Amino acid sequence: MIIAYKEHSQFILILIVMYVLGVWAGPLIYVLFPIMVTLFGIKRRYFELFIITLWLLILSDYVPVENATHDDLQFAKDLKPLLPIFLLAFIFLSRDSFKPFPKVFIYFIPFFIIVTIALMYSTNVTIGLQKNVSFILMYFVVPIYVLHLHKTMGESFWKALMTFIIGMLTIGIILKFAVPEIGNLKSGRFKGVLGNPNGLGVFLNLTFILWVLIREFKLASFTKKENRLILIVIFLSLIWSGSRNGLMSVLLFYMVYQLVKINWFIAIVAVFGLVAFNDQIFEIVVSIVEFFGLQDYFRIDSIEEGSGRKIAWIFAWQQIQEYYFLGGGLGHDEQIMRANYYWLARAGHQGGVHNSYLSMWFDSGIIGLLAYFGGLLTIVFKSMKNSYLILAFLVSFLFNITYESWLVGSLNPFTIVLLIILTIFVANLKGVNYQVVNEQVKE
């Protein structure tokens, strides 16, 4: 990983300069950033473009500290809608070098059509259309870049990608101690470079899955020290965040992952067992937590109410009845929840729906919900021919989105990692050094 830092030291310096300009140089960043992205695209520096996208999406998740007069990272929120457009433009400028295109996008075309039609019922068509376009573009461009970088860079791409992600998480750990008002919430829960602890939990879960996939499919090799560092950074961040959803999602993935390695059928039986006896298992888990005296850490008193989520879920379900078959387009859930923020806050809930199934139902109706998960399950069944490891991902993913609504968003640091994971499965990526192979063919 140190080698990856050295190889991309100049690029890292550019990111630091862009960050400094964005925070302290005012409107200058709005001129220089598009120029920088354009230059990287013209020079076909696609890895840098991809990392810039992930970097800006992470920065855009930042939430200003309490009583802050302004958002230091507002530039990231303002500029991020440009990224999928830039990525798409460079694909068309160099179409032949990106072929063949991976099929991730194809599985979700019915959902894209339905959620676009649903805009007819949007309370704000302009915002809904923008969200629809960015969602569709991200599902199109991210898999294409991942496959292209895998073919052209091989192991170095995957190692540099993990190095960058762990680097950002490490910065978060440094902030926890160096600038605690940024790295932590006022309550003391750790959020690192993300906007909140629960978002950090989602990101850590996806990062853990990505790391396991990279190792299992031999996309890159890590030394014992590197693997130890990755684990320490992920699990320290996870524990400090106090994200129960993140912790349980990681544990579910690891449990099913280990069972799959023994026997895929045993793994499936175990999954059905979890679903069938979830109430009993929940009571056992609570008893174990109480036995070890960890009630305060896991906030047992708020689990049953879902930390206010149940209030949002009941309200969302009531509102969904008006958009049962066809929703109001992406972002519709946010608009409805925002309009009712005052009385929801008085009832004990702050934020959005906190459930991706309900949010997607809000936005695309039951038809769109079935279309999206129909596409996802098709990917799962097809991928099982190559690896049953996708079962572990599916269980963890379905549990995770039960408590957060990030799935209906696209310009966030979670969706891009999800699309990387899906590309690995759909394209059946394996650890082959394509760069060496291509050089041998030319000779």
Image (tube, rainbow, N blue to C red):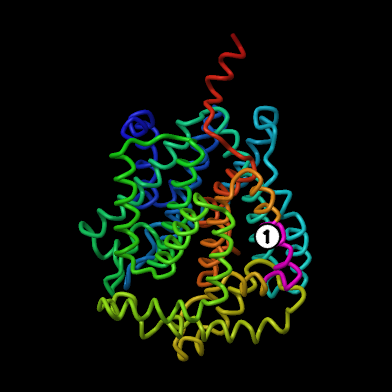
Q: Callout 1, which amino acid?
A: Asn
Give x and y (percent) for residue 196: 39, 66
Instruction: Give the magenta range.
Output: 363-377
Q: Nearer the viewer, residue 179 or 156?
A: 156
Residue for badge 1: 132
Q: Residue at x 65, y 59 (%)?
A: 130
- Does any portion of residue 32 appear in the rendered image? no
In the rendered view of the protein, which quadrant contains the C terminus?
top right
The image quarter containing residue 8 is top left
Give x and y (percent) for residue 183: 29, 61
Left/right of residue 88 with respect to residue 18 in the rendered view: right
The vertical placement of 242 against 291, above or below, is above
Give x and y (percent) for residue 6: 33, 30
In the rendered view of the protein, which quadrant contains the N terminus?
top left
Q: Nearer the viewer, residue 4 or 238?
A: 238
Left/right of residue 181 with respect to residue 391 in the rendered view: left
Q: Residue at x 61, y 79 (%)?
A: 336
The vertical placement of 9 against 398, above or below, is above
The vertical placement of 143 against 293, above or below, is above
The vertical placement of 310 against 142, above or below, is below
How packed is label 1: few (under 14 Cα within 10 Å), some, or many (20 or more)?
A: many
Residue ranking furthest to the top? 443
Left/right of residue 156 with respect to residue 96 in the rendered view: left
The image quarter containing residue 244 is bottom left
The image quarter containing residue 346 is bottom left
